[in-house]
Amino acid sequence: MQSSARWRRGWTGLALALAGALATVTATANPLANARYELGRGLQLPALALTFAGYAAVRAQHLEHADARLDLRDFSVFTIWQPSPRWQAFSEIEFEHLVVVDDRGPTASDIEVIVERLYVDYAATDTLTVRAGRYLTPFGRWNQVHAEPLVWTVSRPLVTQLTIPDHGTGAALLGSVALGLNTLDYTLYVDDSADLDPVNGVADFEDFDLPGLSNDFRHAGGAQLRYHFFGDRAELAASWASYAFTDTPGHMHAFGVDGLLRWQRLELSGEFAWRDNSEFRNDRGGFVQAVVRLVGQLHGIGRVEHYRSGILDRETSRATLGLGWRPLPPLNFKLEYSAGDARDLAPDGVQMSFSLLF
Amino acid sequence: MRTTLHAVFAALLLALLAAGARAGDTALAVIVPPGHALATLDTPTLAAIFRRKLRVDVDGRALIPVNLPPTAALRTAFSRAVFDLDPPAMDAYWNERYFHGVQPPHVVTSVEAMLRFVAATAGAIGYVPACRVDARVRVVLTLPLPPGFESDCTAPSQH
């Protein structure tokens, strides 16, 4: 029932995006004038103020207590429509698990169609944009850039999955303010998923199957400040959110900090979060990750992380070692091994992926 | 006597012309169309425009930054002067912006193409060697070229 509801939401979102595009096409004399495509930058149709973009990812896994598996895991299509300088509409429709190959052979029975994002932006001033719709929760950094081609590892740190739901549905105010040579990005948001999301309560987790944990807001409010400095080579951010889950009792208050530093061959990043659970023990956790460019576009990656779930009354530490190769900016090859002390929560094993921005 | 004065005058004139050419080729001019609302610009605002964080002006008109190709020496000079980064160092930034539906600046292939595009496009902002500025565009900011960069002011189609 829940899966078919997500299908309906996904196909409805796709239909809305296509209907909008079709209306624009039929109203334009030469819709393909000055059309251009570039790998990693999408298909731009300036006459229609439309851009089609997206990414795809294939993942192979051999994890403990599970069969080896090849998964055409993500095929995401972005539709961007900017009919005027102040207005922009954005949608991301994601097709997950298009083809899965395991010991049963290939199957397409696990396909999911998901509306990842669907929102309208209005640039009210040069430093204030108003957003309405479904967006990625602005808590931490990883969640807002979690697409396979953009991150260094196949696996996702626990703190970025378990602290707060991935998506909100509601409204946000966001913008960027110059502070001398540096920049401060800000976001304020409110969520009313209980009333605005027609399939509220069915969101799953990216890497886990965790009965007893919800990945949906019922209601939420939050804010994030992100400071860019050192010639934009460094970032430091603070996040706060107050919310209730859909299927978990109690009210939560979450606080997080994250940072990023890129200097010559090295990239250092980390996120830490603490959550007060009114009905359970607190959650807390974080990760630290280092990426070193070894030779050419081959990189070595190392990450350590720890998370305590108050709701599950479990805690785990995990380490990941990997290699990443980015022969071109839109392409990303990864190979990694992860091991931890809670194998039923996050099994040990090898993962690899190929992904691209198209 | 007259021949000597003529020779001195010619030498002075040649020296002045050479000095003018050398001054032009060590500066980078940020340009807009003549009717653009911007009177002047500072480096932080220029950086925000070229990072596509600032996409409309105070009156809601589109700001359209224009780059030279990433392999162009002047593009590298501009990137170092404004961002203190080479163009490849910004690949990760543009990939993340792409994920959020934001495209990098439009790219033209030459300095002459830059002049034509900026002159003909309302809201455009680009850059050329200061010595290549002409009546088609207006300068809103002049930046010194980083050490090691010099522009060729005599070749119309070079970067």
Image: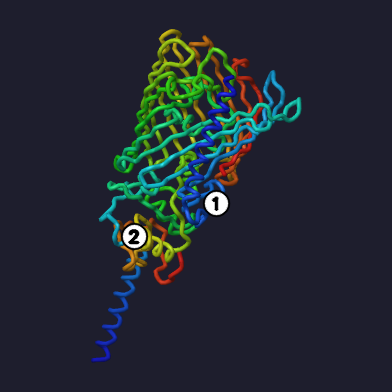
> Which residue occupies 30% across, 40% down?
A179
In this picture, residue A353 sits left or right of residue A79? right
Q: Quadrant of the C terminus of chain A?
A: top right
Vertical order, B77 against A97 (above or below): below
Could you say whether the residue bearing mark 2 is in a helix, strand or loop? strand
Circle nearer the viewer, 2 or 1: 1
The picture places residue A203, in percent across and down from the top left corner, at: 53, 22
- Number of numbered discs present? 2
Distance Cα–Cα, label 2 vs label 1: 30 Å
In this picture, residue A266 sits left or right of residue A170? right
Vertical order, A38 against A253 (above or below): below
Q: Quadrant of the N terminus of chain A?
A: top right
- Please say whether residue A219 is visible from this viewpoint: yes
> Which residue occupies 57% across, 20% down?
A2
Vertical order, B127 against A188 (above or below): below
The picture places residue A285, in percent across and down from the top left corner, at: 48, 19
Vertical order, B111 against A106 (above or below): below
> Which residue occupies 59% across, 26% down?
A320
Q: Chain of mark 1?
A: A
Could you say whether the residue bearing mark 1 is in a helix, strand or loop? strand
- Residue sitting at the far right: A104
Residue A37, which numbered label? 1
The amino acid beneath tag 2 is Ala
The reply to the same-chain question for discs 2 and 1 is no
The residue to which callout 2 is attached is B29
- Counting other residues with Cα less than 10 Å from the Cα at mark 1, is it few (<14), some (14-19), or many (20 or more)? some
The picture places residue B61, in percent across and down from the top left corner, at: 32, 50
Kindly indicate the quadrant of the structure image that contains residue A334: top right
The amino acid beneath tag 1 is Tyr
Q: Nearer the viewer, residue A275 or A246?
A: A246
The picture places residue B131, in percent across and down from the top left corner, at: 35, 67
Kindly indicate the quadrant of the structure image that contains residue A170: top left
